[in-house]
Image: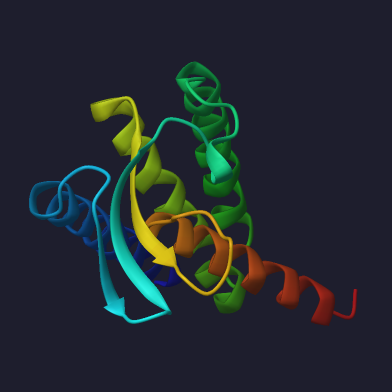
Amino acid sequence: MIISISLLLVMILVVIDQLVKYWVATTIALGASHEVIPGVLALTNLRNQGAAWSILQGQQWFFAIISVVAIAVIAYLMVRWRQQPVLMVGLSLILAGTLGNFIDRLLNGYVVDMFELLFINFPVFNVADSCLTIGVLILVIAILREDD
């Protein structure tokens, strides 16, 4: 039951990620930026061929291998920890983020990024990146709180 709910969550998040990326790519000119919350958040249409801060730019084969390995490991952990709802939420978010960016790399050769924090020097990111970050935080907190 938990696995079914987790997979539904993954599918919903991947669809949201892809829809937001599509909307930004078709609505905002490449490289253009539109402030949503002045001084805080802008929507910026960027193509990222690397990871955060564009590191490993153009290494799509590397990201493809990492993504496939990550998906396999996450699937194993989801089966192993299927009775632990908090861990399943974290893993579902990580899987959704991994799949969302992997789809971009396969279809486009780059990842569409759009959320730009204006008050801090931080990489422009997307829904999938947010899922990855929140999922990892959930796992870290859950693991640190475990007794054994």
> x%, y% of residue 103?
31, 37
> x%, y% of residue 9?
34, 67
Res. 82 visible in picture:
no
Question: Which quadrant would residue 91 be assigned to in this image?
Answer: bottom right
Give the residue drawn at x 63%, y 56%.
Answer: 80
Instruction: Return the residue nearer the eye: 80 or 20.
Output: 20
Give the residue drawn at x 58%, y 72%.
Answer: 83
Instruction: Return the residue nearer the eye: 92 or 25.
Output: 25
Res. 101 visible in picture:
yes
Task: Reply above or below: 21 against 2.
Answer: above
Question: Which quadrant would residue 90 be assigned to in this image?
Answer: bottom right
> x%, y% of residue 89?
51, 71
Question: Which quadrant would residue 125 be assigned to in this image?
Answer: bottom left
Left or right? Give the position of 85 relative to 22.
right
Left or right? Give the position of 75 relative to 100.
right
Task: Reply above or below: 74 against 102.
Answer: below
